[in-house]
Amino acid sequence: MKKLLACLLLSATPAFAQDMDHMNMPGMNMPGMDMSGHDMAAMDMRHGMHGLFGTYGMSREASGTSWQPEAPPHDAIHLPDTGDWMVMLHAKMLGVADSQSGPRGDSMVFSSGMLMAMASTDTASGGTLGLKAMLSLDPLMGQRGYPLLLASGETADGVTHLVDRQHPHDLFMELAASYSQPLSTDDSVFVYGGYPGEPALGPSAYMHRVSAVDNPTTPLSHHWLDSTHIAFGVVTAGFVHDAWKVEVSQFTGREPDQFRFDFDKATFDSTAARLSWNPDPNWSLQVSAGWLKSPEVLEPLLNERRLTASATWFDKFDFGTLAATLALGNKHLSDGTDESAVLLEAEYKPDDAWTLFARAETFGSDELVPEPGVRQAGEVSAGLIHDWRLADHLKAGLGGLYAFHFAPRSTAAPYGGGPHGAMAFVRLVVE
């Protein structure tokens, strides 16, 4: 990790940046250049920068094996002098002051962030070998995570449910390898393995999603949509035909435990399948289903069937860029409990300095209040960020957000009148 941090900091200096080619990967683009749609895909192919899983442009790929629209501009550092390998790096660090209201709220100052690296090379047989690594700084905030009203899922201590707080992610979020082999100009097959990795279930994980990448909070509907993005043991096989991708995963259904620095046991006891379609550079759609064995350590006898569907859109206009995602998720537990969630989020960038983001979501949960039954809850939030570019590959930002919560009523554990939350944060992005 020390070597990776050294590379990131070195590459952020102006002197180093002048000697580097700025190239595109999922989550990355050169400031001031229009790197979108078919132009981006064509540039990718001219530079041999096709996707890890097919002959399409690399900008189509997001977290794990998921797809996003090809049009979004994103930023990354391409390391020079790496021979036949293409190596790219990205990092984001956050310092957050968080305040959640009411008798079930709390206040906390914490840090979070992630470091990402990707490498790929083309083989003599015409295939592509890819390597991915993503590390999280979340464990530094402490085992209990940060206050977030109406959040639930996983456990902080292995004994009690974590409610009204967002759990930290594991130090190792992804350590994965993939290999793809083209069958024709438009067709390819691939295999992906991760420990940890992300199975073919749900939309792209929220921290990679173009409509959520700058929002510092975890969606409350995370555990209905993309909570399997850290699974300790994943194998995925897939087939790509032009704008279509079908894939099947065998993975470990149990969510990561409360020990955030270790590697959990791989059981490969769960299955997922996903169908993705990118009809044009501005759209990415998916439907997926998963059968998770014993996902919760506190309820080991319960299995889960999960269904998701999502549509992500991005476009660039004279007045800036717009991105949006609509996602639906359903969890059906083996005890008959049925819970659904709907998420709508958007992000608007009028220029390189400003970002505005918003999210609205509603879901049913039986974990928020002690009274029996599934209760409906929701949130509407909005925020903005101002960034200052310190160097070609380094920017610092200051932002804030405000959230209105719609909490279920409870006499035993009330949320109080008009529950809400607010955050102020600073960030440093190496791209």
Image (cartoon, rainbow, N blue to C red):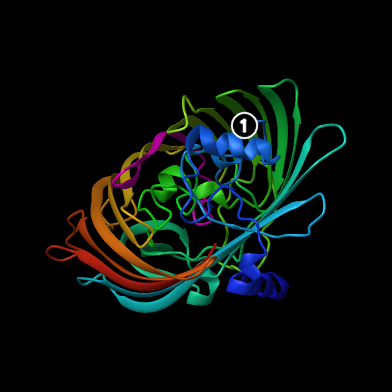
Expressed as whole percent of the image width and height from the top left, the position of residue 367 reads 34, 54
Q: Quadrant of residue 87?
A: bottom right
Q: Residues within 10 Å of mark 1 (few under 14, many from 20)?
A: many
The residue that appears at 46% across and 54% down in the rendered structure is 32
Indicate whether residue 399 is drawn in magenta: no
Expressed as whole percent of the image width and height from the top left, the position of residue 9 reads 61, 74
Asked if residue 395 is positioned above or below residue 247 in the image, the reply reads below
| Nearer to me, 66 or 20 | 20
The residue that appears at 46% across and 27% down in the rendered structure is 280
| Nearer to me, 379 or 412 | 379
Asked if residue 12 is positioned above or below residue 218 in the image, the reply reads below
Residue at which label 1 appears: 56
The kind of secondary structure element at disc 1 is loop
Expressed as whole percent of the image width and height from the top left, the position of residue 30 reads 53, 54
Q: Left or right of 311: which side holds 91?
A: right
Q: Which residues are magenta?
A: 295-323
Q: Left or right of 118: which side holds 230?
A: left
Q: How many marks?
A: 1
| Nearer to me, 74 or 80 | 80
- In the rendered structure, which amino acid carries the disc numbered 1? Tyr
The residue that appears at 48% across and 67% down in the rendered structure is 156
